[in-house]
Amino acid sequence: MKLISEKLPTRPQNTTFPCAANTQKFTQWKKDNKQDYHDHSKLVEKALQLLKERIRKGDPLARFLRGQLYFEEGWYEEALDQFEEIQESDHQAVYQLGVMYYDGLGTEANPEKGVEYMKKILESPCPKARHLKYAAAYNLGRAFHEGQGVPHNDEEAERLWLFAADNGNPKASVKAQSILGMYYSTKEPKDLEKAFFWHSEACGNGNLESQGALGLMYFYGQGIPQNTDAALQCLRQAANRGNVYAQGHLVEYYYKMKFFTKCVTFSKRISGYDVSYDVPTIAQITDCLPEYITKGIAMASFYYARCLQLGLGVPKDEAEARNYYSKACRLCPALADELYSLVIRQKI
């Protein structure tokens, strides 16, 4: 399971520069509306001018804000230079350097260096680093889980994630709470009660990935008695918020319940996602793992192909069905094989 870094936590007091906020949908703006792109570019240019003036006047925060603006705009080389310039005096810059070196943003990936920056945050006695410690612990846990920059050690990853999750504290790392839910549901032996607990904590703190996971745990009675109504409520809410994996499972539910028109409507839209473009964009906006976004698209593609092949809720089109079967296999071969085996056994 390939994880993603924790985004930079905000300070307890608001220090986010206005034009740098809410940029997750910028890529979609560029795709959908050229005028929005130009308006945004003017806003960024104006922000850089203001920051330059603040730097000239000696504002100690302005250099970091300029680097963060570069980072959020995807200008990673400029961001890296800015953060390296101020790392001795700014813990947030140190945190971002850890993310950038680990993930290879603006530079070649160097997980060892990324780990060292995160350790600096976690071990710092400075009160100004306090709000970064939970996120740094999550990222270090990720490094131990993936065996990148440090030897693979799931026990150490679990210890760090438990620290980062802080018993479900909403001000701690909600991402760590969600990852613990995934970890306990996939490790051997599984501990589904712990998985349910941590997904519940993360969902209660707003995590979209865990909301979809809770829906599936209710649906299949994993770690909790089966409850179809609760399952559908979680899955529908998660799907409405953009969880593609939850959307894929709703498509499967609609197919099995013979709601073919609804199945076709949803599966056609989801299977139309362009994986190379849409998956990274959706992951950025929703903070869901790309692996599960891809699985959701594969599941929708399979069921749309099945409807096309059999003429269920849509005119029969076997040639088009083959295209979507191929897409499902290409995106997630293991899932496609599992679904094909159900077809052969006439389960779907």
Image (cartoon, helix red, strand yellow):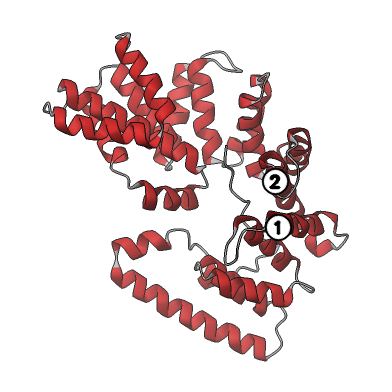
Q: Are marks 1 and 2 in contact (CB under 8 Å)?
A: yes
Residue 262 in view here? no
Q: Position of residue 345 (x, y in %)?
A: 33, 8
Q: Position of residue 286 (x, y in %)?
A: 48, 47
Q: Residue at x 61, y 41 (%)?
A: 205
Residue 143 image label: 2
Q: CA distance from mark 1 to mark 2?
A: 9 Å
Badge 1 is on which residue?
114
Tell me if residue 265 comes above or below residue 114 in the rendering. above
Q: Is residue 82 left or right of residue 20?
A: right
Tell me if residue 99 comes above or below residue 343 in the rendering. below
Tag 2: Cα neighbours inside 10 Å, few (<14), some, or many (≥20)?
Answer: many
Q: Judging from the image, what secondary structure is the residue with disc 2 in?
A: helix
Write down the quadrant of residue 261 in the picture: top left
Query: Which residue is nearer to you in this view: 300 or 174?
Result: 300
Q: Judging from the image, what secondary structure is the residue with disc 1 in?
A: helix
Write down the quadrant of residue 123 in the picture: bottom right
Q: Is residue 117 left or right of residue 269?
A: right
Instruction: Name the amino acid, label 1.
Output: Gly
Q: Position of residue 337 (x, y in %)?
A: 38, 22
Q: Is residue 237 left or right of residue 147?
A: left
